[in-house]
Image (cartoon, rainbow, N blue to C red):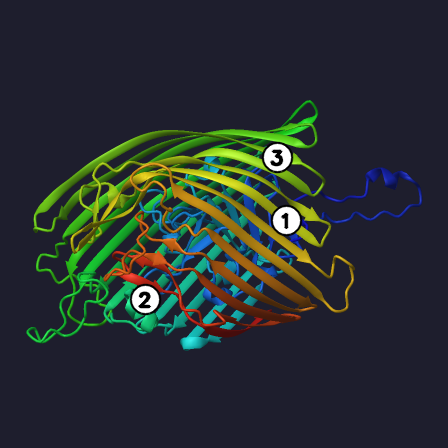
């Protein structure tokens, strides 16, 4: 990575009227010049001290510029984009029952990104920020301009999640065209067909952009076909230099054929096999957003981002009874399959955030104040245990005579969270940013659940919380292009909807009725920057206290095995994260006829262990000790190619650190794995060609074991696949 400069909308360039006073001198009034956006040599950098109404001084953050990367964006491959971020770990479950892969940092559970705050253009896109923080919809990478990632001290301005924030910024329309059309057509292994098309432009004070993406894939495993439509539309009105307002709408429509899980023997024999042909999922997702910015004065601005989510998820499947080894065949005595189980989830929520940013002077040095409030109001309905059909098609009808469900619950979450931060500049090099956030959360659960004996148990739970959070960050400029940063910030994770009532939704796991919220803090100390245009670095150490960690406990009694979700103890995550990139050609010359060769290395070490409780000394779950990614890129004019090597150490799926192979494969080791990817692109004027191979060596590996959905058992990752695509801009 090289110099990464954020240029805010700046300056008008005018010829002074005084020059025209001289007689006989011709004058020309030059048009206003505005420079906006990012300037970067490669695809990764970091945010400036203040950006988009948010203070980032002293915080650990990264920005990934997708147009500067060779990556399989048609299939949203996370390794080739987000993989540059040290310590990023993935649950590769896309197409196996989840519409998207999950991401976690610093040894936190990556499943469906439950430990991270997932956003698009700065607003919430998850089902529920606390009660159901899973991300079914993610911005397609083909439509993404950049990804902003903030860790550690992000909790004060964005919310108290330990894992930080991942913010996908959608591409915008050209400022100098009334109309522009972009198209990308991609095909590949296992029947991959992908078409991405977008339009955009600027007409007077109006700016618009929209895309539509369609995917179809037969799937690497049997019974894993996927078809999906994702769309987005935005219109923005810029009244003047001080005020703009915009409306956005995002949609997702998909249908996934879910292949189910495998046990260890089945995985070792053939990881692409499947024994479930009747499992299906649909996920209609709808997000509408209002965004506005008002510049009160030259030094003070007010931003508003308000999002409304009206979405759902429906599943029909042969449930987990009997484990992955249980057959799903026609029962001779019935002359048909057994009835499947039907589940429905409905989401409605609104998230509104108002932010004030103001600059002022103390002792001739500019200081920055950021303050605001978030108001979230969410409702979720979960219906489980409906009687599905005996067929194999995607039929989500409940055939119970009275349309009843074993579990029928309504959840609500109300969150009001004001915050304030201030960056104090002391001299020209040092800045100190203290901050405070207060979280009021009220969660409720009403309805009923059914226990193992068929007894219907009413549920009426309510849990209010008042949570103060504080933090402080420091930044010291060691040169014009390097700085030392440090921060420590409290974090918090309230228990999710699944744990609010006495009986858990997982049939294979009991829930501790005395479950407590997770709390703790993050701390960072690092040095980052660049040397001219040929070397960049960010090396840091971190400490994360994850207290009252909620994890899966495996209980063995004779030949019987059961699972228990409970607070298993306090876990400390201590480690280092480093990113370095060297452009070997630019080290010696600014102008090269042979092109550019750069190397990058992303490395993390995480010593994540329990320090209290019964499992003291054990490793935390889903916390590989090392994650190493090494890449080499060659570029010449419009051609670029990148080879990526990724290695992830082993981890465990339960607090017991179960290492023996169990019959149900629901807990155990997640072995270390090495994956290689290759990608290339060629741009000729307004046209481009992309091609590549993912999992070049056809490694057999997995990142996820599950005691229930979408397994149970091992969910294999995808084997070797190739793709080729063509694009044009008009």
From what the image shows, is residue 494 above or below residue 77?
above
Count of all numbered marks drawn on residues in the image: 3
**Would you identify the image quadrant in which residue 591 lies?**
bottom right
Quadrant of the image for the N terminus?
A: bottom right
Tell which tag, 3 or 2, sits nearer the viewer: 3
Q: Evaluate whether residue 147 shows in this view.
A: no
Task: Tell me how far mark 3 sits from mark 2, CA to CA.
Answer: 47 Å
Marks 2 and 1, Cα distance to the nearest angstrom?
A: 41 Å
| Residue carrying label 1 | 537
Residue that protrudes farthest toward the right in the picture: 24
Q: Nearer the viewer, residue 318 or 217?
A: 318
Disc on the earlier residue, 3 or 2 = 2
Residue position marked by numbered label 2 in the rendering? 256
Asked whether the viewer can see residue 519, the reply is yes
Looking at the rendered structure, the secondary structure element under dot 1 is strand
Do callouts 3 and 2 mark residues in contact (Cβ within 8 Å)? no
Q: Quadrant of the C terminus?
A: bottom right
- Position of residue 378 measured from the top left corner of the image (x, y, whole percent): 31, 43
Q: Which callout, 2 or 1, points at the residue further toward the start of the chain?
A: 2
Between 185 and 498, the one nearer to me in the picture = 498
Check the image and report above or below for 78 versus 555.
Answer: below
Q: Which residue carries the number 3 mark?
A: 475
In this rendered view, identify the residue nearer to me: 551 or 213. Answer: 551
**Label 3 secondary element:** strand
Q: Residue shown at 63%/64% (left/top)?
A: 633
In what element is the residue under mark 2? strand
């Amino acid at each position: 990575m090289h110099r990464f400069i954020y240029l805010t909308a700046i300056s008008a360039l005018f010829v002074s009227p005084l020059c025209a006073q001289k007689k006989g001198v011709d004058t020309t009034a030059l048009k206003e010049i505005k420079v906006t956006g990012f300037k970067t040599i490669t695809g990764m950098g970091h945010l400036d001290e203040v950006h988009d109404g948010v203070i980032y001084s002293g915080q650990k953050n990264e920005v990934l510029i997708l147009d500067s990367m060779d990556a399989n964006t048609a299939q949203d491959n996370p390794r080739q984009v987000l993989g540059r971020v040290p310590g990023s770990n993935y649950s590769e479950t896309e197409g196996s029952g989840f519409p998207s892969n999950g991401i976690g940092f610093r040894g936190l559970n990556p499943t469906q990104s439950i430990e991270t705050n997932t956003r698009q253009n700065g607003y919430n896109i998850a089902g529920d920020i606390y009660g159901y923080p899973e991300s079914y919809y993610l911005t397609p990478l083909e439509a993404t301009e950049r990804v902003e990632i903030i860790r550690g001290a992000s909790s004060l301005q964005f919310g108290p999640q330990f894992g930080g924030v991942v913010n996908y910024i959608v591409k915008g329309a050209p400022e100098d065209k009334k109309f522009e059309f972009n198209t990308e057509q991609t095909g590949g292994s296992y029947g991959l067909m992908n078409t991405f098309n977008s339009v955009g432009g600027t007409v007077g004070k109006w700016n618009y952009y929209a895309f539509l993406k369609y995917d179809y894939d037969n799937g690497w495993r049997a019974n894993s076909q996927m078809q999906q439509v994702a769309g987005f539309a935005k219109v923005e009105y810029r009244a003047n230099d001080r005020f703009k307002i915009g409306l956005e709408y995002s949609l997702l429509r998909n249908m996934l054929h879910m292949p189910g899980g495998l046990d260890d023997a089945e995985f070792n024999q053939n990881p692409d096999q499947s024994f479930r042909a009747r499992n299906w999922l649909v996920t209609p997702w709808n997000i509408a957003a209002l965004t506005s910015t008002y510049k009160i004065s030259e030094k003070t601005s007010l931003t508003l981002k308000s999002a409304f989510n009206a979405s759902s998820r429906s599943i029909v499947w042969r449930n987990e009874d009997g484990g992955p080894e249980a057959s799903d065949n026609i029962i001779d005595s019935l002359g048909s399959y057994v009835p499947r189980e039907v589940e429905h989830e409905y989401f409605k929520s609104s998230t509104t955030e108002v932010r004030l940013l103001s600059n002022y002077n103390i002792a001739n040095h500019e200081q920055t104040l950021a303050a605001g409030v978030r108001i979230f109001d969410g409702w979720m309905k979960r219906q489980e245990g409906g009687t599905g059909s005996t067929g194999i098609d995607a039929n989500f009808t409940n055939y119970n005579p009275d349309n009843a469900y074993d579990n029928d619950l309504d959840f609500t979450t109300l969150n009001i969270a004001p915050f304030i931060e201030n960056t104090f500049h002391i001299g020209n090099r040092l800045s100190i940013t203290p901050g405070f956030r207060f979280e009021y959360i009220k969660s409720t659960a009403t309805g009923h659940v059914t226990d193992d004996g068929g007894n219907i148990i009413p549920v009426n739970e309510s849990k209010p919380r008042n949570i103060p959070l504080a933090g402080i960050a420091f930044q010291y400029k060691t040169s014009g292009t390097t700085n030392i940063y440090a921060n420590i910030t409290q974090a918090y994770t309230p228990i999710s909807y699944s744990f609010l009532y006495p009986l858990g939704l997982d049939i294979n796991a009991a829930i501790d009725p005395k479950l407590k919220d997770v709390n703790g803090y993050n701390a960072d100390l690092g040095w980052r920057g660049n040397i001219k245009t040929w070397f960049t670095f960010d090396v840091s150490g971190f400490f994360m206290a994850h207290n009252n960690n909620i994890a899966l406990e495996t209980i063995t009694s004779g030949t019987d095995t059961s699972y228990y979700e409970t607070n298993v103890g306090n876990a400390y995550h201590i480690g280092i994260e480093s990113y370095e990139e060297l452009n070997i050609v630019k080290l010696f010359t600014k102008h090269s006829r042979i092109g550019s060769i750069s190397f990058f290395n992303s490395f993390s070490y995480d010593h994540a262990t329990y320090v209290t409780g019964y499992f003291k000394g054990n490793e935390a779950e889903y916390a590989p000790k090392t994650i190493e990614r090494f890449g080499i890129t060659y570029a010449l004019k419009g051609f670029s190619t990148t080879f990526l090597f990724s290695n992830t150490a082993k981890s465990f799926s339960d607090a017991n650190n179960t290492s023996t192979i169990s019959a149900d494969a629901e807990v155990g080791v997640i072995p270390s794995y090495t994956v290689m990817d290759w990608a290339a692109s060629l741009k000729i004027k307004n046209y481009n060609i992309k091609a590549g191979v993912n999992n070049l060596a056809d490694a057999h590996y997995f990142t996820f074991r599950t005691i229930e959905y979408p397994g149970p058992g091992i969910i294999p990752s995808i084997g070797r696949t190739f793709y080729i695509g063509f694009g044009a801009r008009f």
